[in-house]
Structure formats: structure tokens, C-alpha cells
Image (cartoon, grey):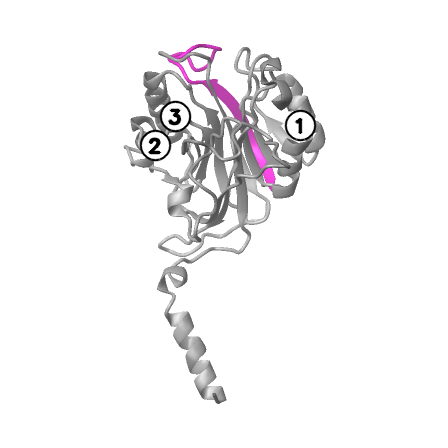
Amino acid sequence: MNWFHRMLAISLVVLGQPAQAAVQRCDTHELRVMTYNVRLDTPADGPNRWDQRRDLFIGQLRLVRPAMLGLQEVVPGQRSDIASAMGGYLVLGGGRDDGKAAGEASPLLVDKLRFRVSASGMFWLSPTPLVPSLGWDAAFRRVVTWARLTDRVTGHRILAINTHWDHIGVQARLNSAVQLRGWIAAQRQAGEAVILLGDFNAPLTEASLQALLVPHGNFPGLREARAGSRELPVGGPATFNGWDLVPKTSQTIDHVLVGPGLEVTRYHVLAAHFGGRLASDHFPVIADLAFTRSGKGCAATPRA
């Protein structure tokens, strides 16, 4: 094949990939996010208690090294272990019993080199969100941890959110979605991308999650990362494993949801084990994201 025919063949290959060519990214600085239910430290877990799997769990975090990480079921001792091991991260959010140290937490970890934090906080999923409280038919208090971030690399601004919904209360999950939807609509600033991480204890088909996927008033509607992944998703549907290496049911209850302006490049349920040992009773969900061009082209990205 001569030079002309080689170039023609290459051109045809490129032109034959409209799906990838149609995506216009503002930059090549991908953003890796991760949600992971740590499984609280309890003696009832016997050989799966935290001190027997701590190094496996932290080893995964260090290997994946997400820029943003949402954890759930974190009790104070686990928080201390993770914070010590992940020194390059800010750990945001307090416990559900007092907003400080007591009870399980759903902390948001952000890479200090990648992000500048301008504000952060937490609230309860209940009719009284500013005080420790139980919502509706929930079995336990449930919280949301949030932060306003500026990407030091691209200058983009992000409203990052992490949560853990109730595993019993169906009405509580639906009301949690409505509350969170309203909060995002009220708090999201112009030009701010939204990333929502969490253990929602619900499949995408449940009305609670459907309420987050559809635009409503000033709420833009979110997309689930697996369904929106540009590359073929990796890993099975099960995110809850119940300590089974190969889960008997395909419970997809941990999700990464993103708002407009973000493309999901890759998605991975990391169903890893270590010689027959699991790091948690959930598998982590990982998504690589990239900011996309708006209809008028990329906005300026000032240095942070």
C-alpha cells in the first residue's frame, strides 16, 4: 500500500467513529471520582471486622487515588485510620448523631492538590435538616455532606455531594430525593457542575432515584455514570456483595450521578478480592469524568 492509500485508510477509520468525534471536551484533565461504603467497624463481623481488612481497604484507595471520594458508614476509628493513611486529602463532614464525631459519617474526601474548597457542610435528610434528626420512616439518621470546589487544574467549579440513604424506609428514600433535589436547585450556582456520590440503598428503577434523573424546575436532572459512560463499563451490576466473592443477587445500590457539563469517560465497579478476602461488603464504584464544551464553546478557565 502506497503513502496515499495509507492516509486514506486512516482518514476513513477516523471518520467512521462519529460517536467519539462528536464529544468535545474542554480539556484532557480527567477527574476520577469514587464512592465506597466502608462497612462500619463492628465485632459482629468476626473475621471481616475492620482491623482484619483495614489495609486491604486503604490499599484500594491508594491504588485508585480518586480526586474525589465519597465514603459511607464511617465510624470515628475508621475515619482516623483513613485520614492518617490518606494525608493528601481533606476529610469533610461529621457524624450523623451530632454533626461532629458521634455516629456513622458520610465524609467527602477531596485531593488537596487538585481542589480548593470554598465552602462545605452537612445536613440531615429529614423535615428538620439543620439538627440531628430522624427522617420519616427511616431506621437511622441519614445525612448529606457537601462542598463547593474549584478545580486547580481547569478552573471549573463543582458542587460535590455525598450521601447514604436509609435501607428500610421507602418513603424516607423518596423524601430524601425530593429534599436533595430541592437543595441542589436552591444552592447550585451558575456554571457549577454537580457530582452526587452515595450508597442510595436503591436501584435506579426506584421512584427515589428517578426523581433525581429528571429535570424539575431549577433542578437540571442528573445522569447515572454507568449508563452514560463513553467507554464500555467494566464490572458487573452488583455493588453490594454481602461478603460474597461472587454476589448471588445483582444489587446496584451505589451510584455516581453527574449533572450537565460533565462527560463520563469510564465506569468501573471494582469487584476485587485479596486471596478470597474482601475489603468491604460493598464494591467501590469508580468513574472518570471530563468537562464538556457548552453550545457556545468552552468558557474561560482561570487559574485557581
Sequence-earlier tag: 2 or 3: 3
Residue 114, given in percent of the width and then of the height, sits at 61, 43
What SS does tag 2 mark? helix
- Image side of residue 241 versus residue 55, left or right: left
Query: Which residue position holds label 1?
Result: 54
Find the magenta span and give its range.
Answer: 113-135
Q: Are marks 3 and 1 in contact (CB under 8 Å)?
A: no
Q: Identify the residue shown where x is 46% and y is 56%.
A: 25
* Magenta stretch: includes residue 235: no
Quarter of the image where one finds residue 63: top right
Mark 2: which amino acid? Leu
Residue 4, given in percent of the width and then of the height, sits at 45, 87
Mark 1: which amino acid? Arg
The reply to whether residue 283 is in sight is yes
Q: Nearer the viewer, mark 3 or mark 1?
A: 1
Q: Is residue 166 above or below residue 7?
A: above
Mark 3: which amino acid? Leu
What SS does tag 1 mark? helix
Q: Nearer the viewer, mark 1 or mark 2?
A: 1
* Magenta stretch: includes residue 124: yes
Q: How packed is label 1: few (under 14 Cα within 10 Å), some, or many (20 or more)?
A: some
What SS does tag 3 mark? helix
Q: Nearer the viewer, residue 86 or 187?
A: 86
Q: Nearer the viewer, mark 2 or mark 3?
A: 2
